[in-house]
Image (cartoon, grey):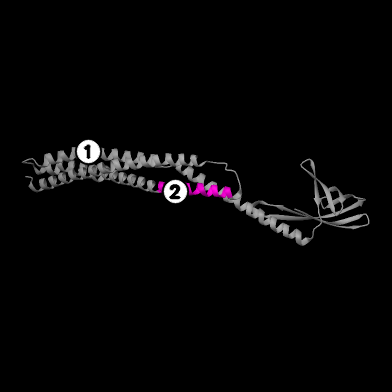
């Protein structure tokens, strides 16, 4: 916005020109230039200071038109009579309009950024990798239960022989029970695989819960973005509601697959753990009984 104030004495003109322009973040800035010039009939030549720019103008009744160079072209602006109070009110109203426009554009930007960030989280979901970890830990659990059964059965068979010498009990049988079964598997890789399975199962449970919240969050963020567009009177330039529904639908499929994998394996895993624990306890009882009865 421009405010031109001129005083004419004879053919001489002097005064000032106030420029008010928009800045980023809804702010405005102003600059004032000095004006000097001459007028001949209705034509005038004005020099701006300190820039030294020369402008051509003319009087039209009580109004003044001035030619301004702009991007290689000439733009003619018409100045009509006003006063400082009215101009200040115009500037205040324009400043408020500029601030509101910025706030609305910022609302569009921030709501879209939030929505796109959530969509990216969905695309990079860890559910497939969490399911892989669950399957791997489940396979390990199965493997070590088989090992416990094999060694545990051997311990029980040897320990429950009718006559077993103490040399054998404290020699081969002890090595088999403590080294191979007790430390080598039960309190080693078997216990580790149980913990791994528990962690993987819990991770899926947490991710599934978080996934439900992310779906609700995305729906709200999309609506917030559309609302901000409507307030600003802007045309949507981004995902449609059908695009969002596809993202959510695909995400739900991943959630269902991960949850199904967890529910399918968890009962079997508990049975495997109980089976491994049961054979270990039997082997331990047999070994301890053998140590009391050996001769």
Along the viewing direction, whichever of 50 and 254 lies nearer the viewer: 254
The reply to whether dot 2 and dot 1 touch (C-beta < 8 Å) is no
- Identify the residue at image location x=76%, y=60%: 86
The verdict on residue 271 being magenta is no
Q: Secondary structure at mark 2?
A: helix
Left or right: 144 as drawn, with respect to 97: left
The verdict on residue 224 being magenta is yes
Per the rendering, the mark at residue 216 is 2
Q: Which residues are magenta?
A: 210-230
- Sequence-first disc among 2 and 1: 1
Per the rendering, the mark at residue 147 is 1
- Identify the residue at image location x=63%, y=52%: 102
Left or right: 167 as drawn, with respect to 79: left
- Identify the residue at image location x=39%, y=40%: 254
Left or right: 92 as drawn, with respect to 173: right
Q: Position of residue 53 (x, y in %)?
A: 83, 48
Left or right: 110 as drawn, with respect to 122: right
């Amino acid at each position: 916005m421009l405010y031109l104030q001129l005083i004419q004495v004879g053919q001489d003109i002097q005064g000032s020109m106030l420029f008010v322009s928009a800045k980023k973040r809804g702010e405005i800035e102003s600059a004032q230039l000095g004006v000097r010039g001459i007028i001949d009939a209705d034509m005038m030549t004005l020099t701006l200071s300190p820039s030294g720019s020369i402008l051509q103008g003319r009087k039209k009744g009580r109004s003044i038109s001035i030619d301004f160079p702009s991007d290689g072209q000439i733009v003619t602006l018409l100045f009509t009579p006003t006063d400082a109070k009215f101009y200040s009110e115009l500037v205040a109203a324009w400043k408020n309009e500029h601030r509101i426009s910025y706030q609305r554009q910022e609302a569009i930007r921030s709501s879209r950024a939030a929505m796109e960030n959530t969509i990216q989280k969905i695309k990079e979901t860890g559910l497939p990798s969490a399911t892989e970890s669950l399957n791997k830990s489940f396979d390990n659990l199965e493997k070590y239960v088989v090992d416990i059964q094999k060694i545990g059965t051997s311990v029980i068979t040897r320990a429950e022989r009718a006559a077993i010498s103490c040399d054998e009990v404290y020699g081969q049988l002890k090595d088999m029970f403590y080294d191979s079964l007790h430390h080598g598997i039960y309190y080693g890789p078997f216990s580790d695989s149980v913990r791994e399975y528990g962690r993987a199962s819990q991770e899926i449970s947490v991710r599934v819960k978080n996934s439900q919240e992310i779906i609700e969050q995305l729906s709200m963020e999309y609506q917030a973005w559309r609302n901000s567009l409507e307030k600003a009177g802007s045309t949507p330039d981004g995902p449609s509601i059908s695009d969002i529904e596809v993202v959510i639908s695909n995400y739900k499929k991943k959630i269902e697959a991960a949850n199904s994998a967890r529910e399918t394996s968890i009962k079997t895993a508990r049975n495997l753990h109980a089976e491994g624990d049961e054979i270990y306890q039997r082997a331990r009882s047999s070994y301890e009984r053998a140590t009391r009865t050996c001769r």
